[in-house]
Amino acid sequence: MKPKSSISNRSAMADPAIVREICHSLKQMRLSKNLTQAALAEIAGLNRVTISRMEAGRAATLLTVVQVLRALDKLDILDIFREESEISPLQLLKLQEKQRQRASLSRKKTVADREEKSEW
């Protein structure tokens, strides 16, 4: 595990260094599952050389990374890319104004009401 200071300072890192860090993390995930490169490649539907190159920090497509994450059962890592939209306070107020505040009486008279008033 890396010190927190190096993890939080990614904006100062060069792009190739970030790629190496991601690739190192993928390798650690593979090793924690006790999988060889060949086994992971077979599960992911890739060539072992592709896994080896990716773990070495060489170019890998986004599709390859997704295939590897799926094979490692780590697709939930991609949730970080999903940004939840926040509702502004004004929009929230407008939504609350549109909500009903109370129930109203039914304007239709029921059959029982009509029968009580009838003198037949």
Image (spheres, rainbow, N blue to C red):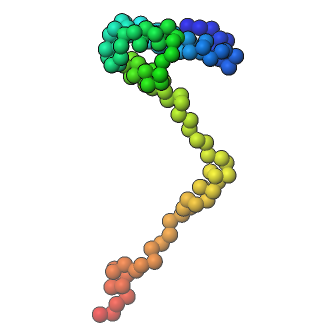
Residue farthest bottom in this picture: 120
Query: Where's residue 75, x and y in %?
Result: 43, 25
Query: Where's residue 37, x and y in %?
Result: 37, 8
Q: In the picture shown, does residue 90 fall above or below 53?
A: below
Quadrant in the rendering for residue 10: top right
Q: How many labels does the image show?
A: 0
Q: In this view, does 88 lie to the left or right of 33?
A: right
Q: In the picture shown, does residue 82 fall above or below 18?
A: below
- Name the residue rendered at 56%, 15% in the picture: 19
Quadrant location, the N terminus? top right
Query: Where's residue 71, x and y in %?
Result: 36, 19
Quadrant location, the C terminus? bottom left
Viewer-proximal residue, 31 or 23? 23
Residue farthest right in this picture: 12
Q: Can residue 114 be seen in this view?
A: yes
Q: Is residue 74 visible?
A: no
- Name the residue rendered at 56%, 35% in the picture: 83
- Name the residue rendered at 59%, 8% in the picture: 2
- Name the residue rendered at 66%, 15% in the picture: 14
